[in-house]
Amino acid sequence: MKKNLMAIVVDDEICDVASPEMLDGRMEEWKRWAWSDNLKAQPLSDFIKSPDSDIEKQVCEFLNACNWYHDVYTYNGLLAIEIIWGDWKHDHLAVDELVEKAFGLTCISKVTTEEDGSDCYSAIHYYKKIKEEEK
C-alpha cells in the first residue's frame, strides 16, 4: 500500500483514493459527484487491517472496503483479481484505477472469461508493480 494516502468515503464505502495534497481543491467536486453529504476523507490505512501482510490480503481488504467482493489471488508472481459479471466502467475500470492509485500496481493483462454482448462481462485482471522508468 502506498503511504499517506487518503480514502474518499461516501456512505461508508471507499469511492476514490487521493494524496493529502489533492484533498483541498477536490472535496467539493467529490460532494457534487457523490450526491451525498455523507462524504469524508480518512487515512487509507484505516481500511487495511493487516498492513504488514502480503499484498493479496491487503488488496482484498481494500476491495471489501469499496464494497467489491472479487476473488483475489496470486498467479505466476502476478496479482490476479477475478471480476465476475462486472460493468466495464463501474467495476473493471474502477478496480484497475483504484488498485493502481492505492498500491502502485498496474493492470498488464485482462482475460475475458464470459461475455454476452452487454456492458457487463467476467474477466481476470493481472497486475504487477511497474517501476516509474518502465511507465
Image: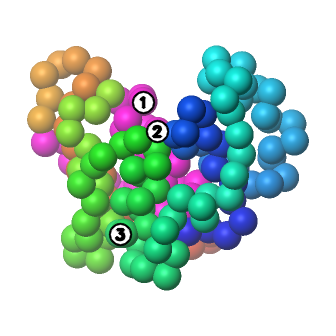
Q: Which residue is mark 1?
A: 90
Nearer to the camera, 124 or 46: 46
Mark 2 to mark 3: distance in Å? 18 Å
Q: Residue at x 32, y 27 (%)?
A: 87
The disc labelled 3 sits on which kind of residue? Glu
Asked if residue 67 lies in the magenta stretch, the reply is no
Crowd class of label 1 (few under 14; some 14 to 19; many from 20; radius 10 Å): few
Amino acid type at mark 2? Ala
In front: mark 2 or mark 3?
3
Q: Indicate the position of residue 44 as horizontal and vertical percent values.
A: 62, 58
Classify mark 2: residues with Cα within 10 Å, few (<14), some (14-19) or many (20+).
some
Q: In this rendering, does residue 130 appear at all?
A: no
Q: Quadrant of the N terminus?
A: bottom right
Disc 2 designates what residue?
A: 94
Earlier-in-chain disc, 2 versus 3 = 3
Residue 119: % across, % down: 28, 21
The part of the image, by quadrant, that contains residue 92 is top left
Element at label 1: helix
First in sequence: mark 3 or mark 1? 3
Disc 1 marks which amino acid? Answer: His
